[in-house]
Amino acid sequence: MRYEAVIGLEVHAQLVTKTKMFCSCSAAYADAPPNSTVCPICLGMPGTLPVANKRAIDFTIMTGLALGCTIPEWAKFDRKNYPYPDLMKGYQISQYDAPLCINGALTISLPDGTRRRIGITRVHLEEDTARLLHRVDASGEAHSLIDVNRAGTPLMEIVSEPDLRTPEEAKLYLQKLRRILRYLGVSSGNMEEGSFRCDANISLRPVGETAFGAKVEIKNMNSFASVERALEYEIARQTDLLERGERIPQETRGWVEDKGYTVGQRSKEHAHDYRYFPEPDLPPVVIDRAWVERLRAQMPELPDEKEQRYRTVLGLSDYDAKQLVADRRTAEYFEQALAASSAGNGRAKALANWIINDVNSVLNARGIEIDAFPVRPEGLNELLDLVDSGALSVKIARDVFARMVETGRSATAIVEEQGLRQISDDTIVLQAIDAAMAENPKAVEDFRAGKTAALDFLFGKVMKATRGKANPQLTRRLLSEKLGSS
Amino acid sequence: MAGDNKGDRAKQNGRTSSTIPPRAAAGVSDGLLDEGYAWTDAPHRPGAGYTWSMSLTRDDVLHVARLARLGLTDEEVERMQGQLSLILEQFETLRRLDTEQVPPTFQVFATTNVFRDDEPRPSFPVDDVLQNAPLREGDYLRVRAVLEE
């Protein structure tokens, strides 16, 4: 029998706020000494009162808008109760039945061009937990150490509908979602550092069946690649069980990265055991439409819109547009260079080529991000000015570019200093042609005897004599004229 | 002050029925939450979603005690069984009221939208933070081993 996978993803994204979700402690826990960004509120001391971080709510609503969600007129926080030492209060403040955003969608494009609409059930806001370090002391006794710094930092949860069907779709969904969060500037989206975490729910069913099979939740996936691998593994495992006529138990399984398999974890406590109830310490959030529109107006151009504009307004190819918008900062670099261009949008194609090929290959070779690239957008644009004015051939421009990357100096300075300016003066080029013809009479004979390759030979001689500076188009034209006429 | 309170209460009553809508407008639909979270028709009434009848069994009490991480003696289990059943019976009495047209009360205060600007303020010194910790190791709280999730 053939089976199809039904996959839904839950993403937890840390928000880039300065402070925690319900208190004014710094949210920058990563480099802070243990338990140094903690106060009675995030410790859950009796008598303290949480107050919600406005920016975190704004960020969540903006994310909902970017995902086409409905923003209800009213939302509230709830307590999710469970006992674990990473929760200071014995409960997590989350949102249960009245989240900030509902009913959105994300459309992904598969490599074959198919587009798939993936429903977003909800986007809600909650608080992160403390960090536990598991240790064994000298006597061999296992214990855990708690660092409360992360506890109470804002965490946004984005829940998809079970609309994904393959591990590849899951990966594409995550990549696209992360890119949107990065464009919005609400999350760093760094998966390895845990700022962007993903749990997957997966079940199998015979193709054609509409009911869902037993759901398995997979945790501990720390990269896009591990999400894809874990889901592939799980599909194989469940298929095998079903084919042997076994039942698949509903459970939580952890992905073991270095072994490449999943293992069963403690059975998930029944949801009712969380005993959700409305958080009495936090008043409801009433979201008037003016607030929503204000946030909508602050939103940057999103990757899909940008890609479309690059194609339709700037006339870039599908490929170029996709490459440029893949990373927000690359798109910004491109747009800054374009804004500096005296040639206006006419330079879009050339800039796109330089960034996608030349700039990116330096970034890859050096393992740096475009923010740290030594040639700033205006500098790249200046180089292209020199090419367009005929002062530099594209070939020499590449050498100049390499010097710019190395030295951080401007294109003009390098060209002047090294005398690299292209020779476009007919008289000087003709002198070089005459000299080359005089020194290579055999080549001239050959050409006249019908060997057109001899022209390339002479062209090479001219370029060599001018150290590559002769304008190539001009040289080729003058050389053919000269050979043809005499 | 008394006048203010009365005003607040009046405002709250007005608000509960207008700006804070019942479940439907709050974005709640049966499809919203995944299967394990399915609503009964009375989400925030005591006992909602639980399977016990008004009289609690011994197992119900042990279940609740386990969730609260309470160790009870047999005598306490029996006593709690009686007391908790009584509390549920009280709610069963309330449940007989027709509340079809009454929006659920999630909050007893009339306030909404109490927010904080995202401006950091100093945290507490680590010695204060760990002052009540039963066990401390360096600048960490130390607890008995918990299973890695």
Image: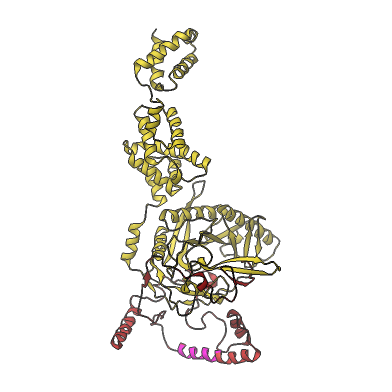
x then y, percent, for residue A478? 38, 16
- Relative horizontal placement of residue A486, taking residue A173 as reference (left or right): left
Closer to the camera in the image, A426 or B94: A426
The boundaries of the magenta stretch are B84-94
x then y, percent, for residue B109? 37, 81
Report if residue A317 lies within the magenta region: no
Residue at left offset 40%, top offset 52%? A302
Residue at left offset 71%, top offset 61%? A244
x then y, percent, for residue B65? 60, 83
Is B96 above or below relative to A66? below
Is A476 above or below relative to A311? above
Dominant SS of magenta comes to: helix
Closer to the camera in the image, A47 or A394: A47
Report if residue B91 lies within the magenta region: yes
The image quarter containing residue B76 is bottom right
- Relative horizontal placement of residue A212, taking residue A444 as reference (left or right): right
In this rendering, does residue A110 appear at all?
Answer: yes
Residue at left offset 45%, top offset 64%? A26
Q: Please, which colouring scheme is shown?
A: by chain
Closer to the camera in the image, B98 or A176: A176
Tally of numbered tags = 0
**Colour chain A appears in:** yellow
**Colour chain B appears in:** red
Question: In which quadrant of the rendered image does the C terminus of chain A lie?
Answer: top left
Is A319 above or below relative to A148? above
Is A35 above or below relative to A234? below
In this rendering, does residue A92 appear at all?
Answer: no
x then y, percent, for residue A116? 48, 53
Question: In which quadrant of the rendered image does the N terminus of chain A lie?
Answer: bottom right
